[in-house]
Amino acid sequence: MCFGPTASFTSGALLTAAGTATLKTTRSKKELLFAAFPLAFAVQQIIEGLLWLGVNDGPLEQWRKPLAALFLFFAYLVWPLISPLGIYLLETQKKNQRILSVFIPIGIATACYMLWFIFHYDHHVTVVHHSIQYHIHKFANFVGFLYLGATYAPYLFSSYKGVRTLGVLNIIFAAISRYMYWVTFDSVWCFFAALLSIGIYFFLRWLHRPAEAVAG
């Protein structure tokens, strides 16, 4: 599979349109953060598109390092913070809310550590097999588990089947990305996760379907 600025900007534009439509389907303020996930992914994809223009002596060469840091900021800080909170706010069942509330402090702790990590260790990017590889100091395995726990485990504890399905699909594509694109895993996994976030639009449409459709 070939990635590049065209793929990043195209997915960014697609996600911007899908994210705007998703926000319009919301019926409650508690749904807004979860509904904003596609737009957040759109920003992240556009950042990587700009980063593509900064590698291999591109026109944005001087912006390569800050753009890489900005991408990692989204990947390592934003998602551990907003994933558990967005799914928690969406939840209506108290039993599930109690479980989901556990992941919020895990996400905060993970994001704080990753913020220190990004600024403490140097990082750079290269292009490997038509994908961007983010070179950054390897963090401890338990941090990776905390990240996964904060970012994708909350999906699995939602009372909504549609949300759980999105979580399972994300984990499957994460495993595929790890196996097939392990060197450029961060970039490839974020790309697939971004496209999967379009499913939030269809979930919210289903959630707010007319009562007569439910009865039928």
Image (cartoon, rainbow, N blue to C red):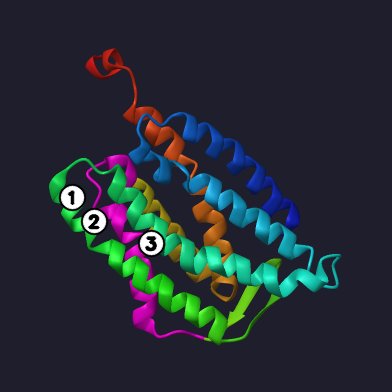
Q: CA distance from mark 3 to mark 1?
A: 16 Å
Q: Which residue is mark 3?
A: 151
The image shows residue 26, relative to residue 8, as above or below, that is above
- Residue 182 colored magenta? no
Say above or below: 24 vs 34. Answer: above
Task: Tell me the SS state at disc 1.
Answer: helix
Q: Nearer the viewer, residue 125 or 71?
A: 71
Residue 214 in picture, x, y percent from top left: 26, 19
- Residue positioned 72% across, 65% down in the render: 51
Amino acid on which disc 3 is placed = Thr
Is residue 155 one of those drawn in magenta?
Answer: yes
Looking at the rendered structure, the kind of residue marked 2 is Leu
C-alpha gap between disc 2 and disc 1: 6 Å
Q: Earlier in the sequence, mark 2 or mark 3?
A: 2
Q: Examine the image and state in which quarter residue 52 appears.
A: bottom right
Residue, disc 2:
100
- Marks 2/1 in contact by CB < 8 Å: the verdict is yes
Label 3, residues with CA under 10 Å away: few <14, some 14-19, many ≥20: many
Residue 68 location, x and y as percent?
A: 65, 70
Q: Position of residue 168 (x, y in %)?
A: 35, 53
Q: CA distance from mark 2 to mark 3?
A: 11 Å
User: What secondary structure do most residues of the magenta stretch adopt?
Assistant: helix
Identify the residue under disc 1: 96
* Chain part drawn in magenta: 138-163
Question: N-terminal of the two: label 3 or label 1?
Answer: 1
Q: Secondary structure at mark 2?
A: helix
Q: Position of residue 13 (x, y in %)?
A: 66, 43
